Amino acid sequence: MLNKNNFELRKEAKELMHRMTLDEKIGMIHGAELFRTAPVERLGIPALTMSDGPMGVRQEFEPANWKSVGNHDDYVTYLPCNSALAATWNRKLARLTGEVLGAEARGRGKDVILGPGVNIKRSPLCGRNFEYFSEDPFLTKEMAVPYIIGVQNWDVAACVKHFAANNQETQRLWVDVKIDEKALREIYLPAFYDAVQKGNAYTVMGAYNKIYGEHCCQSEFLLNQILRKEWGYEGVVISDWGGVHDTEAAVNSGLDIEMSVTDNFDEYYMAEPLKKRIEKGEISEKVIDEKVIDILVLMKRLHMLDGERKSGTYNTPEHRQAALDVARESVVLLKNSKEKLPLSPEKTKELLVIGENADLMHALGGGSAEIKALYEITPLMGIKMLLGGNTKVTYVKGYCQDLKEENKDKNWQADSLENGGGEMESVNRADEALTRYRRLLREEAVMKAREFDQVIFIGGLNHEQDCEGNDRADMKLPYEQDLLIEELLEANPDTVIVMVGGSPVEMGRWIDRANSVIWSWYAGMEGGRALAEVLFGRTNPSGKLPESFYKTHMDCSAHAWGNFGEKETADYAEGVFVGYRYLEAYHVEPEFCFGHGLSYTSFVYESAELIKENGKAYVECQIANTGKMDGKETIQIYLGPKERTVDLPVRQLKGFEKVFLKSGEKKKLRIEIEGYSENMDVWAGSSLNELKMCAEKKGEP
Ligand code: BGC
């Protein structure tokens, strides 16, 4: 499966492996440093060097200590998070993201980049959702595959993670996922399947959680039966850091490399303890040989052994441009009911910007996805850069996050194996002094909002909530922002509301009164510029939600039906009814539906017909830009059973295409549909709520 000459590569790798001692082999299959295995210098085999993560190449740590090296040579391009990327619905941008990440990883001397994260957003509360693409398996895989191809184009391995059903941080090391196999295969596995089959991902990372009672990183069922046997995967499987719990199970499971967060490298399960078991004859050395062969093949694929390797580079102007291109298309215009947006830069002589997120940098937060960014343009800076010196921009904070004592010498990851490695925490931890301080900030902001014609509020979440090792307790906005927004809209009804975050928040207290609402993600180093361009009409927004924006988390099936939280078992009782699949089938109204996103122009679907040709099915769609601005639209195709039984979703995303249309332009597109059969209806449209059923095209072929 690993391309044409895999057989040859395995043969060569086998010969090399036969020249190795047991110690040398064992050195290759476990961490000898936090992000590196041991080299075999005698035979010219280098160490395998890894780095996080999905949004850029992580800073350098000391080899055996979670202390930053502290040099100034490891700043990098900070790319929009995977949720932002998914909101572009643009496969070319996914490829571009992969290319940048691959080039930068190589440029920084890495062999494996620990991403993309392709876990499904089962609940809006999961702290790592910003690292993941979507609640939908089709959208996830369509974005993940080009991303992986882009990374690996640079002689760097992608590491698709976390395999599998790793959908919460609470009790992340121990939680046992109870799920029916149909849901596992239809919702949680497809992105992994395509990542290895179509993306040819050279490495896969196991997950921390258990599934059917077995830890995923040593799961016979997941790694041997599904990944290795069923899918024929011959790449390298790496454990999550500290995800292995037993020597024998790990060695026999199809896992190749054990990594962890602690510095007792020789005591790792696949280090000395394994050596002893082999020497006693309890475990066969042959099992290790297979692992070493996998790793050597990987090294050959990456040209680590032949000196013909791409060198990569980092922090180029092109990479920063790519970050901007993605950020531009990721912004989602949720609401523009009075068409107050875009604002006019020329007419804006005075502007009031409110909100901590206007002036907050997010790059160096979130857990292992943190980025030491070369720079980060905040929304406030982006707005000021765009408007220039003739507009007076006034900024007030309006709210603030909890004031926490920082312990700069401590890295959370060092202790991350304690307490089950994950918790659920309530976001509002205000004490009296803080409440008073927030009231002052609020009063100042509201008073000022009355004085200004033009007000933009920029709030939402930050990496206190969207963070590894932590789930939210609910979807409520933290730091009393609801109250502030209510009062701002009262003081100045035209206040533009911008939310920044990696997962949705409750908006019910103010959404009906807000005319203009924008969703912006952790959108990388150029995120603030991209947001400003959308606010002031330099970019026509084209982002679409890659997930349902629920009214409250109880409208999500994982909470309404299943469980999620501080229990030993996560019961996925909702089965395949994840995200919009649940909302549609059980008539639950979201605040904003899956696929939703407005534009400053208007698109008309003039026709949408089903075409069957040579065993494949397509939707042929004529679409016109009838508005005044050039813009991009994503045509979404859904399939659903003609005769629905209760165990089937109403419809599911099975195709999409993004298209650019000049004002007044029309285009005809042909979009392939995955998995069509005669007993299905086909819909096309601009979001789940605006679909047209497609009749079959008759007559001409
Ligand atoms: C995370 C992984 C990450 C690894 C290395 C773990 O805690 O779950 O996603 O790649 O650490 O930093």
Image (spheres, grey):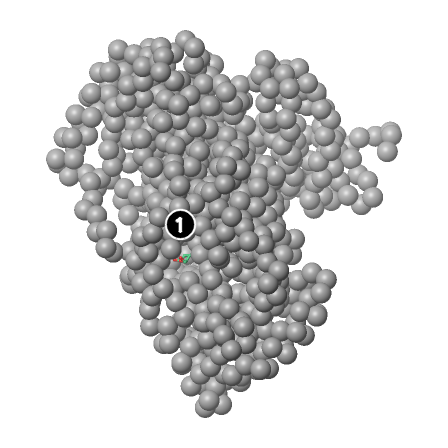
Q: Is residue 559 above or below residue 338?
A: below
Provide residue 3's location: percent of width, then percent of height: 69, 60
Q: Quadrant of residue 268?
A: bottom left
Q: Quadrant of the N terminus?
A: bottom right
Q: Quadrant of residue 230?
A: bottom right
Q: Nearer the viewer, residue 408 or 72?
A: 72
**Outermost residue toward the right?**
700
Residue beneath label 1, please? 74
**Outermost residue toward the bottom?**
280
- Left or right: where does residue 620 sit relative to residue 208? right
Q: Nearer the viewer, residue 365 or 560?
A: 365
Identify which residue is drawn at 66% across, 74% down: 12
| Residue type, label 1 | Asp
Identify which residue is drawn at 53% across, 65% down: 237
Q: Quadrant of ligand 1?
A: bottom left
Q: Nearer the viewer, residue 21 or 188?
A: 21
Question: Does the rendering let one see residue 87?
Answer: no
Identify which residue is drawn at 45% across, 69% down: 37
Provide residue 679's location: percent of width, then percent of height: 73, 42
Q: Nearer the viewer, residue 544 or 695?
A: 544
Q: Quadrant of residue 208?
A: bottom left
Q: Quadrant of the C terminus?
A: top right
**Outermost residue toward the left?**
433
- Left or right: where does residue 640 sit relative to residue 440? right
Q: Is residue 289 above or below residue 94?
A: below
Kindly state the secondary structure of the residue where label 1 is placed.
loop
Provide residue 283's location: percent of width, then percent of height: 50, 84
Label 1 beta carbon within 8 A of ligand 1? no
Question: Does the rendering let one see residue 233?
Answer: yes
For label 1, the crowd category at 10 Å Cα-Cα, with few meaning under 14, some 14 to 19 and many 20 or more, is some
Provide residue 668's location: percent of width, then percent of height: 73, 26
Identify which residue is drawn at 71% across, 65% down: 5
